Image (cartoon, rainbow, N blue to C red):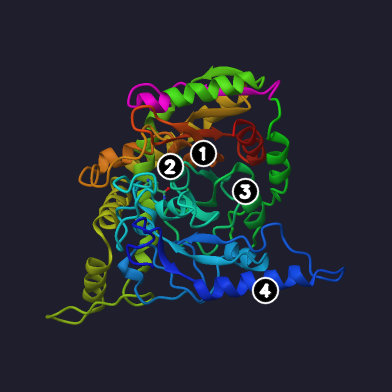
Amino acid sequence: EVDGGERGVHAFLHVNTEEALAVAREVDSIRAAGGDDAPALHPLAGVPIAIKDLIVTVGQPTTAGSRILEGWHSPYDATVIKKIRAAKLPILGKTNLDEFAMGSSTEHSAFGPTRNPWDLDRIPGGSGGGSAAAVAAFEAPLALGTDTGGSIRQPGAVTGTVGVKPTYGAVSRYGAIAMASSLDQIGPVSRTVLDSALLQELVGGHDPFDSTSLADPFDTLVAAAKSGAGSGLEGLRIGVVQELGGEGYQAGVENRFHEALELLKGAGAQIVEVSCPNFKYALGAYYLIMPSEVSSNLAKFDGVRYGLRVLPQDGPMTIERVMAATRAAGFGDEAKRRIILGTYALSAGYYDAYYGSAQKVRTLIQRDFDAAFAQADVLISPTAPTTAFRLGEKLDDPLAMYLNDVATIPANLAGVPGLSLPGGLADEDGLPVGIQLLAPAREDARLYRVGAALE
Ligand code: GLN
């Protein structure tokens, strides 16, 4: 069942049954054969995985949640997909998302929304609502997402799953359709912290095909998660970010958050308060930088190179008019809104006032992080200010939708890693609350250690 199916959750846009079964059978037969010369299997071999449909795959469609890619098939696999195939994880299919990963609810998908398995009237977060819902509904034990401003962590929070945005450059972006290239990161979605560590370690590491890929191997994540589970946190300083809480945060979210702090204290960690005064400008800077990059990245969908081509109904058949007709029909409202915003912000005469200022704010936010990490080893906050809202509730109010990303966006602007893990259910609505941990760039292992200790 695919269309609006999966008992109403609609996490998948495409299900890849035959290929997934073939891989599962291959792993079974390798295991059954056993013996000393049997090929060594990766610990995740045979574990099925769902892939956000922004990541390109050979043999299955890739839609980015948009009509504009209609009929397009990728001629190559993303680097993360190559690694997943080599480790023999059966790929279950491609999951739903907001068009080109723009949104916080998965309602901006051209193929209909995904629903939250905890309550089908609620959103599963976004943009990676499909990956999070697939894991939360026990359709898949693992998934991949992409996180530009929170699209792995916020869906994780509102569906009670674990979601990680690695350090910028820790996982190759080769084959992730670009939304905002300086912010995008691929990362894992799972039910446990250890599972995410296994998946990030598998798909991460240096890739010559991504010029922003770091040289670091990121090969101590699994060991960190294992060492953290059930262990003490003596000597660890955990910084509570003053600006990510209080006004605008739901009471039930704050209650679970304070409970998490008590648990960490009980495990021996020292809780300190840190202040990041420039975080209040993060949302504003993000909604200038991100659309600027979007307007540039989405320029390639011109009706010639990829997917959909719409010919003008009347008048002259010029390239400009084919492009305009294709883009008018192929892009949804949110994509158009951001392309227009970005084009405006980058135009001559406005560049310094908007894009230039936003880049300066970005530097200030990085400095806030540096100062905070001088006082604490790990920072902590609620992942999202509220639990899952109702479908339709924020659809006509883009600003209200954007506000849901207030706690996740700073990490993307600074390139630091963030992990969201379940923190229990909010008292007032019984819905999952997410706890976010943040670490300095390249210190992803620290997140897995503390995450596993808190789990
Ligand atoms: N919700 C944010 C946005 O709409 C983040 C999206 C993302 O991380 N891909 O831009």
According to the picture, the residue beneath numbered tag 2 turns out to be 154
Q: 444 or 427, which lies in front?
A: 427
The residue that mark 1 highlights is: 420
Residue 442: percent from the left, percent from the top?
64, 41
Ligand 1 lies under 8 Å from the Cβ of mark 2 = yes
Depth check, front residue: 344 or 151:
151
Q: CA distance from mark 3 to mark 1?
A: 13 Å
Depth-wise, is mark 3 or mark 2 nearer the camera?
3
Looking at the rendered structure, the kind of residue marked 2 is: Gln
> Which residue is under mark 4?
26
Amino acid type, callout 4? Glu
Circle nearer the N terminus (4, 2): 4
Q: Which residues are magenta?
A: 233-254
Task: Report which residue position mark 3 lands on.
Answer: 195
Query: Which sits earlier in the primary sequence, circle 3 or circle 4?
Result: 4
Residue 203 appears in the rendering? yes
Q: Does ligand 1 reach within 8 Å of label 1's beta carbon?
A: no
Quadrant location of residue 326? bottom left
| Structural distance between the alpha carbons of marks 3 and 4 | 22 Å
Task: Find residue 381 and report its horizontal and vertical position in percent.
Answer: 48, 28
- Asked whether the beta carbons under mark 1 and mark 2 sit within 8 Å of each other, the answer is yes
Which quadrant holds residue 283? Answer: top left
> At which x and y percent is residue 195?
62, 48
